[in-house]
């Protein structure tokens, strides 16, 4: 199941704590473009490749007026380790109750090795300065994700 949100929709307002326990909200990014990316788990190969690609292109994002924010069900401590290990320059939301993922339609049924389970469906939303969805990337190329966004 994929998100039901569409380009042009108002982005759902969210509130969640980042890796340092600071509550971040969509309203904190008003007037800026936001790359909001949902990923399944800290320190797994695909998620690490995606985060490092975004890190390596972070200055380009800033130069174009973008902020970057990652979202996964991992807790604050795991996020802190992931950020430190890979020197990530952006915040990660600890969406432990999946409220943000549910609002964006990225929490759903997945299957691996014949087993079905609930989890994050890797998806990225580009949100404009006014809180409208400018782009949705559902087929994420983890190693070249920045090129898909810019």
Image (cartoon, rainbow, N blue to C red):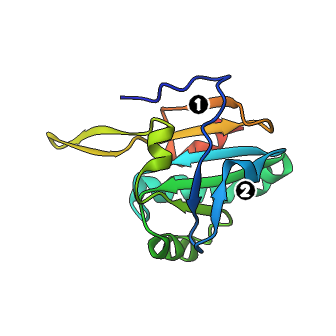
Name the residue nearer the viewer: 31 or 150.
31
73 or 137, which lies in front? 73
Label 2 belongs to which residue?
A: 58
| Residue 144 percent location from the top left of the image | 58, 44
Query: Quick one: label 1, few (<14), some, or many (20+) residues within 10 Å?
Result: many
Residue beneath label 1, please? Answer: 136
| Quadrant assignment, res 129 | top right
Q: Rounded to the nearest whole Å, what is the CA distance between mark 2 and mark 1? A: 19 Å
Q: Does 83 sit above or below residue 104?
A: below
Percent x, y of residue 30: 79, 46
Instruction: Name the image quarter holding the C terminus.
Output: top right
Image: 20 above or below 127: below
Kindly identify the residue that appears in the image at 59 percent across and 48 percent down: 14
Is the residue marked by circle 2 packed among few (<14), some (14-19), or many (20+) residues within 10 Å?
some
SS for dot 2: helix
- Tell me: 46 left or right of 86: left
Instruction: Give the structural element (helix, strand or loop) at label 1.
Output: strand
16 w.r.t. 10: above or below: below
**Residue drawn where x is 43% and y is 52% of the image:** 46
Residue 41 percent coordinates (x, y): 40, 58
* Residue 8 quadrant: top right
Residue 39 vs residue 147, the one in the foreground: 39
- The percent position of residue 32, horizontal first and vertical second, equals 81, 46
Quarter of the image with the N terminus is top left
Position of 16 with respect to 45 (left or right) is right
Residue occupying the point 83% across, 47% down = 65
């Amino acid at each position: 199941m994929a998100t039901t949100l569409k380009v042009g929709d108002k982005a759902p307002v969210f509130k969640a704590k980042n890796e340092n326990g600071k509550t971040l909200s969509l309203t904190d990014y008003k007037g800026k473009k936001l790359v909001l990316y949902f990923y399944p788990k800290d320190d797994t190969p695909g998620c690490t490749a995606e985060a490092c690609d975004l890190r390596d292109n972070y200055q380009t994002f800033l130069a174009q007026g973008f902020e970057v924010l990652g979202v996964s069900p991992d807790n604050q401590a795991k996020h802190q380790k992931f950020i430190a290990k890979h020197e990530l320059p952006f915040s990660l939301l600890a969406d432990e109750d999946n409220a943000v993922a549910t609002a964006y339609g990225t929490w759903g049924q997945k299957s691996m090795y014949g087993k079905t389970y609930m989890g994050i469906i890797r998806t990225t939303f580009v949100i404009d300065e006014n809180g409208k969805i400018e782009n949705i990337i559902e087929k994420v190329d983890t190693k070249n994700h920045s090129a898909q966004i810019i």
